[in-house]
Amino acid sequence: MGAWSLTAAQATSVQGANDRIRVAVIGCGVRGSQHIADILACREMGVEISHVCDVWRGARETAVAAVKKGQNAPVHAVEDYRVILAHPEVNAVTIATPDFSHAKILKEAAEAGKDAYCEKPMAVDLQEALAAVDAVRANQRVVQSGTQYRSDGHFIACASAVHSGVLGLITRIAIAQNFNEPRWRKAYDDVREDDVNWPLFELHHGPHPFSAKKFRRWYLYRDYTNGLPGLWMSHYLNAVAWFMQDLFPAEVVCSAAVRRWGDDGRETEDTLSAILDYPSGFQLNFSMSLCNSADTHFILYGSNGKLDVWKRELSGDGGGGPDQIKETRVLPPENPPNSHMADFLDCVRTRQDPRCPVEMGLAHSVAGILCAESNRLGKRLRYNPEKREIV
C-alpha cells in the first residue's frame, strides 16, 4: 500500500507542491462541520474549501458562514453532490453524509477522479463496500477512512506495544463502550420540508414520505444505518484490525435489542453484545449499552500480561512464564507529525496511502456488517475474504 505508478495522463492531475488543493465538503452536519474546521486548520498547506454541499438549506448556510470566517477564497454552496463530482477544479472531497450513503458517494467520487476523506462507517452494505474499494483502486485515488484513532498518539503508542510482541500470544480482546443516555435524539422542529431535498437525502434507500424526525434522527432507523456496529463499533473494529494486523473476522455472532429508549420509536438497538473470532487466533468480545455508563474499557489479554488501552497501561496482570511483564508502566503517547486530515491532504499531493487507507475502511465495514446481519438473522455468520462473501 505504497505509492502508485501513474500513467502520464493521471500524473497531470496530481497536485504539485505549489498548487492549491481545492476540497469540497459533502455533508455539513456535526462531522462535516468538524471537517470544515480541520481543513481550515490546514490552510498553510495550500488548501482551500471550494464548495460545501448539503441537502438541507440550514446546514449549507451555516457551513458557508463557517468557511468565510476561516478563508479569503470564495466558497460555493450546492445541494447535489453530483455537481461537485462533475466540477473539474475540485481535487478532493470529504464525505460526512448519513451512513447509508458513504459508500455510494465514495464510489462515484473515485470514478470522477476525486480523492476522498470518508467518514466511518465506510459502508453498511457489503456489495457497496466492495464496489467502492474497487473503484478507488481502479482509479488510483487517495482515500482516508475517518477513524481518527489512527492519528491519536495514545492509540499509536498502544499499537506499537502490541506490534512489539511484548504481550506474547494475544488470545482475547475485551471492549465495552457504555453511556447512560438515548443519544441521537436531535431536535427537528427547525426542519421545514421546503428546505430539504428529501429524495436526494434518501438516494437509493427511498422513497419514503418526508419526515423531519427521520431526517434529523436518521441514526435511529434501519433504512439509513446498521445501528451501533456502524455508528460506534466501527472505531474499535478499525483499531483491532490495526493492532492485530488481522483485517477480517472469520466468524461473528451478535445479539442486540432496544432495552430502554424505545419511546422515541427507534429501530436501531441501545444494547449490543458480539463475539468475533479472527483467523489469527484471537477472540474479540464487544459490548455496548446506552442504558448504563459504567465499565467502558478496551483491554488486550496476552500470555505475558495485559494492555489497558484507555489507561495506556501495560502490565503483567494475568500473565505467566519467563516472559511475563515484570513492571506496570504507562505508555507515553507517540504523537504523529500531523492531524488525520492533514495526513490525508499531504497524501493528496504525494500520492501515498494515508494512515487509514480504503482497505482499513473495508475491514471495519465488513466486521460491522457481519455483526448487524448476525443480529438481524439470528445466526452465526462467516466471512470468506477470497470470495468476498458472507456465508
Image (cartoon, rainbow, N blue to C red):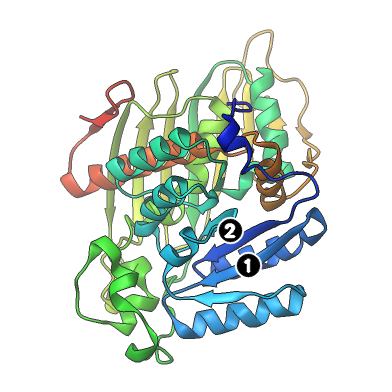
Quadrant in which residue 350 is drawn: top right
Q: Secondary structure at mark 1?
A: strand
Name which residue type carries label 1: Ser
Rendered location of residue 103, percent (x, y)? 39, 50
Residue farthest top in this picture = 322
Name which residue type carries label 2: Val
For the point 32% across and 89% down, which residue is it? 193
Rendered location of residue 357, percent (x, y)? 55, 38
Q: Secondary structure at mark 2?
A: loop
Q: Where 321 sits versus 60, above or below? A: above
- Report whether 220 appears left or right of 235: left
Q: Where 100 sits versus 333, above or below? A: below
Q: Where 69 sits versus 131, above or below? A: below
For disc 1, the marked residue is: 50
For the point 56% across and 36% down, which residue is it? 9
**Residue situated in front as seen by the camera: 54 or 316:** 54
**Residue situated in front as seen by the camera: 223 or 294:** 223
Q: Are marks 2 and 1 in contact (CB under 8 Å)?
A: yes
Res 261 seen here: no
Image quarter where the N terminus lies is top right
For disc 2, the marked residue is: 90
